[in-house]
Image: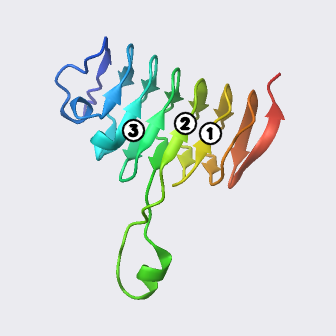
Amino acid sequence: MSVISFYFRTKRKFHNWSQLRKVGKYGENTNVFGDVTIVNPSNLTIGNNCSLNHGVYINAFNPIVLGDDVTISASAKLLSTGIDYDSWIKGEKKHTQTGEIQIGNHVWIGCGAIISPGVSISGEFVVIAAGAVVTHDISESYCLYGGCPAKMIKSLK
């Protein structure tokens, strides 16, 4: 069985790749390496010089904003929604409405990391370690976060 992957650079256009054509806004020099899944792409905003790698899953039920120079490594997940706990207990499945994700400039999200609904990473030069689960806001700059739930491991200055 062979695997076919795609790589292309963009200058304000995503060529004809159907999901990415529907992205709400995107900047220049966006790189896509392999297959990426985007749910509700019109709620996704991508800044300049960003990279999305193979297996990335973005659920933009609520808005997701990526700043400039953001790298999302293979199999990472950005989930802007979940099931509301109270409605689930009652046998209903309503999506939460307050899950916007904001990723600032110069952020690297490691392989297999998960960004939970409602998280804002406003610090610059933040690295999210492989496999980390980010459940709260990160405002510090020049730092490495890892673990489940993610916590600051060390300063990068």
Is 145 displayed left or right of 64 in the figure? right
Dot 1 corresponds to which residue? Answer: 121
Which residue is located at x 45 percent, y 51 percent?
A: 79
Quadrant of image for the N terminus: top left
Q: Nearer the viewer, residue 100 or 156?
A: 100
Q: Is residue 100 above or below residue 128?
A: below
Which residue is located at x 26 percent, y 27 percent?
A: 4
Q: Position of residue 34 (x, y in %)?
A: 34, 28
Mark 1, residues whose alpha carbon is within 10 Å: few (<14), some, or many (≥20)?
many
Q: Nearer the viewer, residue 129 or 22?
A: 22
Dot 2 corresponds to which residue? Answer: 103
> Is residue 54 shown to the viewer in this render?
no
Q: Quadrant of residue 33?
A: top left
Q: Position of residue 16 (x, y in %)?
A: 16, 24
Label 3's element?
A: loop
Label 1's element?
A: strand
Which residue is located at x 53 percent, y 40 percent?
A: 102
Image depth: mark 3 or mark 1 in front: 1
- Contact check, label 2 and label 3, Cβ < 8 Å: no
Disc 1 residue type (three-letter): Ile
Q: Is residue 93 above or below residue 77?
A: below
> Is residue 36 shown to the viewer in this render?
yes
Image depth: mark 2 or mark 3 in front: 2
Q: CA distance from mark 1 to mark 2?
A: 5 Å
